[in-house]
Image (cartoon, rainbow, N blue to C red):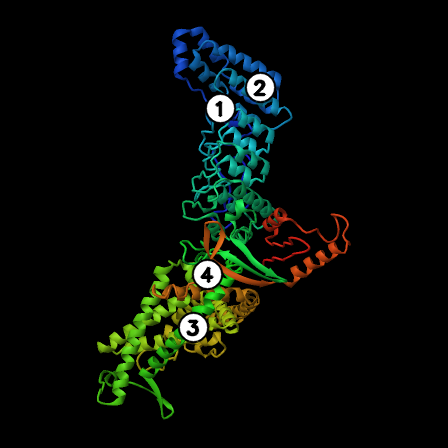
């Protein structure tokens, strides 16, 4: 483990990453070989501060000579730490003998306090045992044995071996933590045999980095530390210890399984050992419900893996299949039958489907901070679950929603204007307010007004619930996924306001109607997500607008406003009776500058201005900056965005459709929930009945390769275990293969063989 004086150069945007996203800045080093200088005086960083205890005061009163002798040897702490660091056994024995002799001046309890005082750094709480383990060398095992034997002899072994750091950055860390981190398995076993506590927690800032704090997170317990640093032997040793509480939770409420999920990264070899140790723990743990414990956020390890985008870990948990009866309850997948390349498997839907609290499906669909959520949604059973929801109810609901909204736009449009004789004739306020209910036209107008008011009210409620209640959306979520909902909401508000202003007799109602009408027909793009080709095209348009056009407009408006003000200031103001330039205001100047930007303007606006040369120079600079630079840059950026988005647009479209599916599912009333519920009851083991999703799969490649192996085995072509075609694995080997490759392939016997394949 690095010293506290080191810094971390790695960074990540994930708040729950084990490595913080800024340089590590801690007040005291865990262990340092650099002398600390203060006010020109240098001393050992491990030297304890003087602390006159009650025992020393009592000794001072009773035996002044002994007290003076102890004061003369107050630097023994520093020398002991130096001896254990360098592995100097002779010096260590001599120093221990010296402090042993001094301890005779005290009573029993005070003698132990004195010896503990001399073996410990008072500013950090670091003992000489910790110092020895932080500086591993060939003499360290013997040093550890000598120190523990000394403390055992004087009756404070338990107190000494379980002493913890007191400094806030490493608070709670014991010698057992350090021995595990230094991968000293024999010393770990020796410490456990001597009574080292296994359920201690290192809660310092370095080990439990919370928000705005920096450090490493490997869990706080020795078990979590051993698991996260790939020490399966130590994990086994700790789990076999009767004192170990495997369900212990740290400051975040995380168990050892949560800690393993947290330290999972994109590096595949790293993830392989994490998954293996995770599997080892849940199999060997007597508590088969360890995986169901939730942390402070209410998340199980599987839900945490989904929230943090841990693809391989989530894939392993979702598709885990265990054959032995003892651990079959841990399976989340069960292969029901297989016939040739065809197999049928059932997947546990607990914590996966939307019926569960903090469901993985909702988490992946709504959490825009999960950058690889499209990859996670492609895992089974999530992928098939979404497809089945779409086919069962979302597709028809989507069509009905489209027809409803299309009719709303048509009626809203026809209600306020319609073509007549080749020209568009708008209804006047007087025409609209005077409804002749005796005529067919008046009745239809009334019905139309009532219909659009009802529809607009429904849209306000529906979209308001989708944005603010079902899933509270931050700005990032709104921009990436929910901006159509915002547009629907704004349009509905405008429709209601236009109707109210119309009834109140306000002439400006028409402006609200026009904006609502433009939004209404633009919002029809929302329904392109029901079709893959149109949906992908719509995604590309959205990305170009949000990524490039908005940036261009921001810069362009600055140029337009700045040059517009400058040029308007140079335009001559006319007096009465004089012939004035047509460009005599800021508004007209801005309009002409915009025309120049798109190539439709001219330079005649310089006539009748002060300083025509300066005016012309400003125009030329403006044209270069906007027409030549900004527009061409926009075209280049749009081209690059299209190339980039085209590779991921299908994933974005799938995410949009997934969100639409879940939103439609939320709208299904409670009376129809059971009707559209997916899954079937299945029996995993005795008294273990779950709601599962059945998935059929055809995998010719795996089936063909295994059939070839079986045929070669039968014909005697494979004579050795190291043959080209691997031998058929037994059940235990299948479970191991399933953990590592997430694929199960079984052949019971040559006479009665069957194949089981996973996606």
Reading the image, the residue beneath label 3 is 396
* Helix, strand or loop status at disc 3: helix
In the picture shown, does residue 78 fall above or below 550?
Answer: above
Reading the image, the residue beneath label 2 is 146
Reading the image, the residue beneath label 1 is 121
Tell me how many marks there are. Answer: 4
* Helix, strand or loop status at disc 2: helix
Q: Which of the two discs, 1 and 3, labels the residue nearer the N terminus?
A: 1
Classed neighbour count for the residue bearing mark 1: other residues with Cα under 10 Å, few (<14), some (14–19), many (≥20)? many
In the picture shown, does residue 163 fall above or below 255?
Answer: above
Q: Which of the two discs, 4 and 2, labels the residue nearer the N terminus?
A: 2
Residues under labels 4 and 1: Cα distance? 62 Å
Q: Is residue 196 left or right of residue 399?
A: right
Name the mark on residue 462.
none
Residues under labels 3 and 4: Cα distance? 20 Å
Task: State which quarter of the image contains the C terminus.
Answer: bottom right
Q: Seen from this angle, which residue lies furthest bottom?
A: 421
Residues under labels 1 and 3: Cα distance? 72 Å
Mark 3 or 2, closer to the camera: 3
Please state which of residues 651 and 122 is positioned toward the viewer in this rendering. Answer: 651
């Amino acid at each position: 483990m690095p010293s506290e004086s080191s810094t971390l150069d790695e960074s990540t945007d994930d708040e729950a990453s084990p490595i913080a996203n800024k340089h590590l800045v801690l007040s005291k080093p865990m262990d340092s070989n650099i002398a600390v200088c203060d006010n020109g005086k240098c001393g050992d960083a491990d030297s304890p501060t003087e602390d006159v205890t009650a025992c020393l005061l009592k000794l001072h009163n009773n035996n002044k000579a002994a007290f003076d002798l102890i004061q003369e040897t107050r630097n023994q702490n520093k020398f002991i730490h130096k001896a254990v660091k360098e592995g100097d056994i002779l010096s260590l024995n001599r120093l221990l003998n010296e402090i042993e002799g001094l301890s005779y001046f005290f009573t029993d309890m005070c003698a132990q306090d004195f010896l503990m005082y001399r073996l410990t750094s008072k500013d950090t709480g670091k003992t000489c045992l910790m110092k020895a383990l932080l500086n591993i060398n060939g003499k360290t095992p013997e040093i550890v044995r000598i120190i523990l034997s000394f403390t055992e002899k004087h009756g404070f072994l338990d107190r000494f071996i379980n002493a913890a750091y007191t400094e806030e950055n490493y608070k709670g860390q014991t010698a057992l933590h350090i021995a595990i981190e230094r991968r000293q398995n024999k010393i770990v076993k020796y410490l456990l045999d001597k009574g080292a506590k296994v359920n201690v927690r290192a809660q310092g800032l370095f080990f439990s980095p919370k928000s705005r704090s920096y450090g490493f997170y490997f869990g706080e317990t020795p078990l979590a530390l051993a698991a996260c640093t790939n020490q399966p032997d130590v994990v086994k040793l700790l789990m076999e210890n009767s004192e170990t509480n495997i369900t212990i939770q740290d400051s975040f409420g995380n168990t050892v399984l949560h800690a393993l999920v947290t330290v999972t990264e994109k590096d595949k070899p790293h993830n392989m050992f994490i998954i293996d140790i995770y599997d080892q723990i849940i199999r060997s743990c007597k508590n088969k419900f360890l995986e169901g414990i939730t942390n402070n956020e209410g998340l199980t390890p599987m839900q945490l893996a989904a929230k943090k985008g841990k693809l391989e870990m989530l894939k392993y948990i979702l598709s885990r299949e265990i054959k032995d009866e003892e651990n079959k309850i841990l399976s989340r997948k069960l292969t029901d039958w297989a016939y040739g390349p065809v197999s049928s498997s059932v997947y546990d839907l607990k914590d996966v489907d939307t019926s569960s609290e903090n469901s993985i499906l909702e988490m992946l669909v709504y959490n825009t901070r999960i950058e690889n959520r499209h990859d996670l949604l492609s895992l089974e059973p999530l992928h098939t679950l979404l497809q089945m929801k779409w086919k069962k109810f979302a597709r028809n609901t989507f069509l009905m929603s489209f027809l409803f909204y299309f009719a709303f736009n048509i009626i809203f449009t026809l209600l306020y204007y319609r073509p007549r004789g080749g020209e568009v004739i708008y209804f006047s306020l007087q025409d609209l307010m005077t409804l002749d209910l005796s005529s067919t036209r008046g009745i239809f107008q009334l019905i139309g007004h009532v219909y659009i008011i009802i529809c607009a009210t429904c849209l306000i409620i529906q979209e308001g619930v989708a944005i603010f209640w079902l899933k509270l959306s931050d700005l990032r979520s709104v921009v990436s996924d929910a901006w159509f909902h915002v547009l629907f909401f704004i349009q509905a508000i405008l429709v209601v306001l236009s109707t109210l202003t119309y009834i109140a007799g306000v002439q400006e109602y028409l402006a609200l109607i026009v904006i609502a009408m433009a939004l209404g027909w633009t919002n029809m793009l929302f329904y392109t997500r029901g079709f893959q080709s149109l949906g992908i095209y719509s995604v590309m348009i959205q990305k170009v607008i949000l990524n490039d056009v908005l940036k261009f407009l921001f810069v362009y408006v600055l140029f337009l406003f700045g040059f517009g003000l400058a040029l308007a200031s140079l335009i001559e103001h006319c007096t009465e009776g004089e012939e004035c330039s047509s460009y005599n205001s800021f508004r007209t100047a801005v309009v002409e500058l915009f025309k120049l930007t798109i190539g439709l303007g001219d330079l005649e606006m310089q006539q009748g201005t002060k300083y025509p040369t300066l005016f012309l120079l400003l125009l030329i600079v403006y044209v270069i900056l906007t027409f030549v630079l900004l527009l061409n840059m926009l075209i280049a950026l749009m081209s690059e965005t299209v190339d980039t988005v085209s590779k991921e647009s299908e994933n974005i479209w799938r995410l949009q459709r997934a969100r639409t599916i879940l939103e439609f599912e939320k709208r299904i009333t409670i009376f129809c929930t059971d009707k559209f519920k997916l899954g079937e009851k299945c029996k995993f083991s005795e008294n273990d009945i779950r709601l599962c999703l059945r998935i059929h799969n055809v995998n010719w490649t795996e089936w063909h390769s295994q059939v070839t192996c079986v045929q070669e085995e039968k014909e005697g072509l494979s004579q050795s275990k190291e043959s080209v075609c691997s031998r058929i694995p037994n059940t235990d080997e299948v479970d191991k293969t399933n953990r590592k490759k997430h694929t199960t392939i079984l052949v019971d016997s040559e006479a009665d063989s069957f194949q089981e394949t996973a996606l």
